[in-house]
Image (cartoon, rainbow, N blue to C red):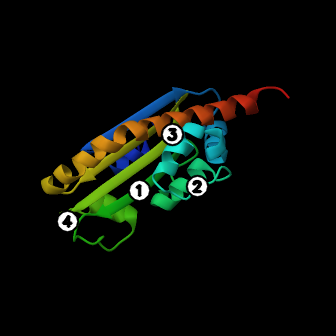
Amino acid sequence: MPDESESALERMLPEWHFREVHRIRVPGTAAEVMRAAHATTWAEAPMARALVAITGADISARRRIVSDFLREMGEVIPTGDDEFLLAAVQGTGDVPRPPGTVSEIVTGCEEPGILKIGMNVRHAGGMLTTETRVLATDERTRRRFAPYWFCIRFGSGLTRTSMLRAIRARVLREMSPA
């Protein structure tokens, strides 16, 4: 039986080479907060919207951050009411993506040239957290990915922080009496 304090991301990708964590205190039950997380739109997180738009991603103000955009990035793995888990894999250079589902590849593939990516949004203990983990299957892939991670990390952090603040604002609006 899994440890309830351990996230599904920790169970799926316990080791990583690159990691980013952002958190914010958000009142409410896990169900209330995660419902708000799935309903929050890019219009509610203008900083995140602007930063993601720079990448050329197809976003509109009405599209939901978690439910729409993140689903396009990989495979959504059901985890329960308190967490949204996304898994993705990427082959580098001439290495094609191995066969199998994304979650099978993330948990079992060791072929060189693959990046295993896990990301979650989770509400536990009053904290809303988003964490990303990236594991390269070999040292060459890790070294090649490191400069990219260095370049995107600051903008990614701003995007995540803006996203978390927008979710918290939605929760607070929904909790306040009409």
Q: Secondary structure at mark 1?
A: strand
Residue pictured at 49% horizontal, 43% vertical: 51
Say whether residue 104 is left or right of residue 178. Answer: left
- The residue under the point 39% across, 68% down is 101
Which residue is tagged 4? Answer: 111
Q: Which residue is mark 3?
A: 122
The amino acid type, in three-letter code, at marker 1 is Ala
Give neighbour class at mark 3: few <14, some 14-19, many 20+ (Cα, 10 Å).
Answer: many
Local SS, label 3: strand
Quarter of the picture containing the C terminus is top right
Q: Residues within 10 Å of mark 4 (few under 14, many from 20)?
A: some
What is the spatial separation of the Cα atoms under label 3 and label 1, in whole angstroms? 15 Å
Q: Rounded to the nearest whole Å, what is the CA distance between mark 4 and mark 3?
A: 30 Å
Q: Is residue 3 visible?
A: no
Residue 163 drawn at (x, y percent): 55, 38
- Cα distance in 3D space between marks 2 and 4: 33 Å
Neighbours of disc 1 within 10 Å: few (<14), some (14-19), many (20+): many
Label 1 sits on residue: 87
Camera-nearest residue between 140 and 172: 140
Percent coordinates x, y for residue 152 in the rendering: 35, 44
Distance between the alpha carbons at the discs numbered 2 and 1: 20 Å
